[in-house]
Each structure stands twice: as C-alpha cells, then as structure tokens.
Amino acid sequence: MSNNDLRVWGIGTARTMRAHWMLAEMDIEYDLRPIGPRTGETMTEEYLRLNPRHKVPVIEHGPFVLAESAAIVNYLSETYPAPEGFYVPRETARRAALNEWCFFVMTELDAHPLYLIRRHFQLAHIYGEAPLAVESAKEYFCEQIDGMMKKFPDGMESVMPEGMSVADILLVTCLDYALALEIPLPPALLAYRERYIERPAYLSAREINFA
Ligand SMILES: N[C@@H](CCC(=O)N[C@@H](CS)C(=O)NCC(=O)O)C(=O)O
C-alpha cells in the first residue's frame, strides 16, 4: 500500500478515469493495480474477494473496500482535504443538490444510455447487436442532455454554482464516453468540457488511465 494506505484497482475506462482524476486533483499518492475489464484480471480470486461483481474501479483505503466510481469520487472528496476551488458541500441541502446531479449523471447518462450503446454497439461481438435499442438510447441521451442544458441557458463553468465538484468529474467523463461513441453534443457543453480536459490533473490522470 502507498503512504496514504490507498490502492486503486482499474484502468482503461471512463469509470476508472474518475478515481485517477479525483486523486490527481487532490495530489494524493496511491498504489495502482492496473487491471482492465474483459482481460480476465477482474475474475481472479483475489479481485473477486474485493468485488464479486467483477467491475473496475475499486479502491482499498486500509481495510475499507469501495466499488462504484461515483461512490469512490465522493468518498475521496470527503476524506481528503479539498484542493483550492474544489467544492465539497457540508450542508445537507447543498449535498442533496450535488447528489441530484451525481445520480442524474450516473443513471440517466452513464448507466442507462451510454452503457447500453457501449454493450450493444461497440461490444456487440460480445453482448449481441440491438440496433433499435442503440438508436433509442442515443435519442434518450440527447433528450436528457437537452433537459440538463435548460438549467444552464448561458452555458456553464461547473455543474454546481459554487465551483468544480465531483459532479463535474462524473459529467466530463460521461461526455468523453459519449464523444467516443460518436454522439453529438451541444456547443455549450463542448466548451464546458474543453475547460476541464485542459486541467493538469485531468491530463496526468489520462496518462495513468489510458497508458
Ligand atoms: N457502475 C459502475 C460500472 C463499472 C463498470 O461497468 N466497469 C466495467 C468497465 S467500464 C467493468 O469493470 N467490466 C469488467 C467486467 O465486467 O468484468 C461504476 O461506475 O463503477
């Protein structure tokens, strides 16, 4: 384990990128286990003991084991001191407002449409073709994005008015994922993403995650 007693399992996907990006923003050292999906590495006895659902990412913080990328970035943001300009709400209503965005991104963008398109388009050789479902998931994604943008009629600097937060890490990595799936995004959202992907922490996390 690293000096911080922290280990991250997983590289190679938008979901693993979140943990590496969050830790790069916080300048925290950690031990890396660079295992990838569909390599057999998520199916070893050692890994299945940590995550029987055989997904990456997972973190170990001392004896504490945590899966699910959104839970991981939230945990890290609350466990370590936030970097300057990074918003970690402490008040219940503001945490709820942040959670609203986190759950929106994870359920309405990531887990449903994007993952469906990934499985039945890019990974159709494994999971089978489903062209109608893929088309409908693309429409659904764009409709959800349109709805989201109505909250930001003048464009956006960050999801939360207080500044960059874990919601931006979740959203930007979803936008990366959407662009890789050739889904068009509105100009205001592309401009928002541009600002985040120029951040040194994003760039150094990309080097680790997509090495
Ligand atoms: N909801 C999970 C999804 C994680 C996930 O689906 N990971 C995929 C790669 S993107 C994976 O680990 N697949 C490997 C496997 O199923 O063995 C999260 O956000 O962490």
Image (tube, rainbow, N blue to C red):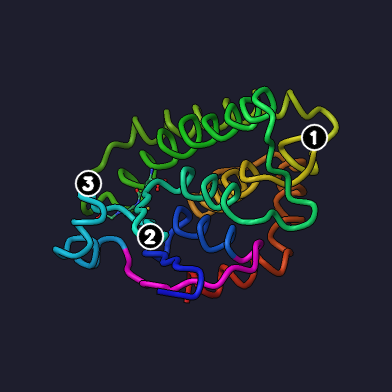
In this view, the mark in front (2 or 1): 2
* x then y, percent, for residue 6: 45, 66
Q: Give the magenta range.
A: 24-36
Q: Residue at x 31, y 46 (%)?
A: 119
> Which quarter shows the N terminus?
bottom left
Label 3 CA crowd tier, 10 Å (few <14, some 14–19, many 20+): few
Find disc 1 in the rendering and name its residue: 161
Sequence-earlier tag: 1 or 3: 3
Q: Residue at x 56, y 35 (%)?
A: 102
Q: Is residue 149 left or right of residue 44?
A: right
Q: Are marks 1 and 3 in contact (CB under 8 Å)?
A: no
In terms of secondary structure, where does tag 2 sit? Answer: strand
Give me the disc on residue 127.
3
Give me the disc on residue 78.
none
Find disc 2 in the rendering and name its residue: 60
Q: Nearer the viewer, residue 191 or 121?
A: 191
Q: Is residue 45 left or right of residue 162?
A: left
Q: Is mark 1 within 8 Å of ligand 1?
A: no
Q: Residue at x 65, y 23 (%)?
A: 147
